[in-house]
Every structure is written in structure tokens, then in C-alpha cells.
Amino acid sequence: MQDQHLSKGARVVVAMSGGVDSSVVAALFHEAGFETIGITLQLYDHGAASGRKGACCAGQDIHDARDVCERLGIPHYVLDMEERFRKAVIEDFAANYGAGRTPVPCIRCNQTVKFTDLLGVARDLGAEALATGHYVRRVQRGDLAEMHRARDRAKDQSYFLFATTREQLAFSRFPLGDLEKQETRAHAERLALPVARKPESQDICFVPQGHYSTIVGRLHPEALAEGEIVDVDGTVIGRHKGVGNYTVGQRRGLQLSTGERLYVTAIDPGRHRITVGPREATLRTGAELRDINLLAEVDGKVEAMVKHRYNEPAVAARFDPARGTVDFVEPQGSIARGQACVAYDGERVLGGGWIEAALG
């Protein structure tokens, strides 16, 4: 692995989660002759969330990261960031659901703990770069660094990194962006890393067994208060189990017997009310964005491919960061407040913002 923009043998801090991806990143930098330091963030104790005394899945991840560093013969440090993570990510997550939004905690974690706090630690240690196991490409164009989608589209994480600032991107490295997932596994096997066959985690790290309502109910119990389900005309047609259990565009879990497929079209947390309607009623022509972050120069309104939800494909739209709006070429469903909306010019990430309202 080469990086012509780093000094020979430069000090590089690697954010190590204990998984195979970040472990391979540390191994590749070490193999290439860089002074590599592994840092693991202790973010959350699952014992507190699950009610099982002493249960701590994060603890196993820390042990795995330490084992990898011992195998490589590089330093490993653990930073206790639980309090910071609780305030910046967990409380924000619960508050957003309580306000009728659909948050993306992975973006908040990247935006605060990883690419603000950890990056600051890397600078304090005299490192020339912070490297992570994210699947995204950093492309150097002269003096400017651009963010591009990963070669492995199935693993691409550029959506979750849209809030990275230009300064943070310049200091960061993502060596897995040019690899397919199976190539990463092959490197782990070749380097005899103890996590080579460790399965990937699919859940939100601080949500035990995927039941996010447990966290929401503990921090914002009002979000799980029962309320009315109404149709698009305002007629009450059922009851729901709390606005914190729903997102715009959701169909499953409504428990309605109306003879037609209904979807959540709006969430009113103030009145504890959910509005539902046919799929056509969920379609919107655009979105209003807040807290826009640009990773490229954007002059006025531009044609772009826009991803308005992490599990939805990018669609054609007009992105206007000055006005804070996105206008879709074709109406789109599931435009939910609190989700990120990210604009692309081909492979390059232009930037994005948080959806504040659906338009049209």
C-alpha cells in the first residue's frame, strides 16, 4: 500500500473497532512501513441496555482489537468515550425519534466522536493521518481531497460520511475503498489476523438485539405513548404504539384491517398521531435540507444523483445547496425528517444535508 501524500514511515493512527475491516487497515499500514498506532473507542456497555449484568459485547471487540495489535506488534490504546457517545449519539438518537424524525446514528457518530474527537487525538499524537475501515475512496486532485464512492458498491459507506468536513477528509485515509469485501478477507487470512473470519455486525452498536424502541422509551417515554392512526382525510382508523416506533414510508407493523396496503405518510409527535395512506400519498417532489456540508464546489443548482435514505438507491434530482433544497426529477416516497440526503456527481460526493421537511 502506497500513499505519496504521506511521509515515508509516517505515524498513522488507525481507528480499530475490533472487526476485520479496521484490523486489515492497521495491518496494511504496518506492512507498508508506517508507524502504526491502533486506537479503539469504548463507546457503549451493552450490559446497561440489556439489563444483563456484566454483558458487554463492546468489551469483546476491544479484546479483538488488542489481539490484532499484539499480532502486528504495534501499540494499542483504548479511549473511554462513553459519556461523549451517550450525549452526542444515543441521546440525539432518542430525541429525534421522540420528535417524529428518523435519525441515522452512524452519521452522528462519524460526525462527532470519530472524525472530531478521535481525529483530534491523532493530531495530538503527531500523526500525519487518521485511517479507518470505511468503504469509501479518497481521491487527491492537486491540493484538494475528494470523496468518491467505494469500488464495492454493495459496501459503499459514502452516505454515512457526507458530514465529514474538507479539513477532516484531507487528514483521513480509507485504504479499503479500492477493495472488494472478499479481498479484505483475503488480506486478513494472508496476514493471519485473529479476526479474519469474524462475522460482521449488522445492528446499531448500542441497540441490543436490534430493539431500538428500548432506548427511545428509556430516554423519551412520551415517544412510546399510544395515539391515533388517521387516514389522509383525518378519519381515525386505528391506534398506534407510540410515534417512536414508526417512520415515514413504513408499511409493516401498522396492524390495520382496511383491505388495502397503507403506509405512514406523516408523523405528528405533538398530537401523538400517525397519518397513513396509499403509496401514492407518500410521494413528494423534493426536500428541504438543513446543516448542509459541501465536499466539492457547487455553483448554484446542479443536476445530481441523490440518495435520500440509507437503504434507497440514488435518484436523479436538482441539488441547490444555497437554498437548501433538493428537487426530484420523479416524485419519491419515504422522505423522512432526520434522514440524510446526499448528492453525487458520478462517483464523487458533492455533499448533503439533513432532511428537515418533505416538499410537494
Image (cartoon, grey):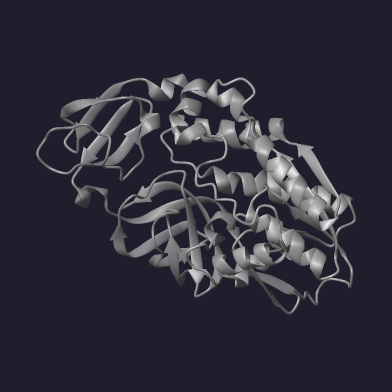
Residue lying furthest left: 259
Q: Is residue 184 left or right of residue 247?
A: right
Q: Is residue 300 above or below residue 360?
A: below
Identified at 43% across, 52% down, the residue is: 288
Q: From this view, report whether residue 114 is shown above or below residue 72.
A: above
Q: Is residue 332 visible?
A: yes
Residue at (61% x, 72% y) in the render: 178
Q: Quadrant of the image for the N terminus?
A: bottom right
**What is the total number of numbered labels drawn onto the structure image?**
0
Q: Quadrant of residue 171?
A: bottom right
Name the spot of residue 298 as percent of width and height, x first: 56, 70
Quarter of the image holding residue 55?
Answer: top right
Q: Nearer the viewer, residue 301 or 294?
A: 294
Residue 191 place in picture, x, y as percent: 72, 64
Horizontal arrangement in the rendering, residue 90 relative to residue 18 (left or right)? left
In this view of the protein, which residue sits in the foreground, 318 or 312?
312
Can residue 164 be seen in the rendering of this structure?
Answer: no
List the single residue furthest toward the bottom. 142
Q: From the viewer's perspective, tell me whether residue 319 is left or right of residue 136.
A: left
Q: Position of residue 75 (x, y in %)?
A: 86, 50
Q: Is residue 148 above or below residue 64?
A: below
Residue plotted at (35% across, 35% down): 246
Q: Residue at x 51, y 27 (%)?
A: 215
Give the camera-side residue of 193 and 326.
Answer: 193
In this view, 318 is above or below 40: below
Q: Position of residue 201 (x, y in %)?
A: 54, 47
Tell me which corner region of the image, top left, top right, bottom left or bottom right, holds residue 272: top left
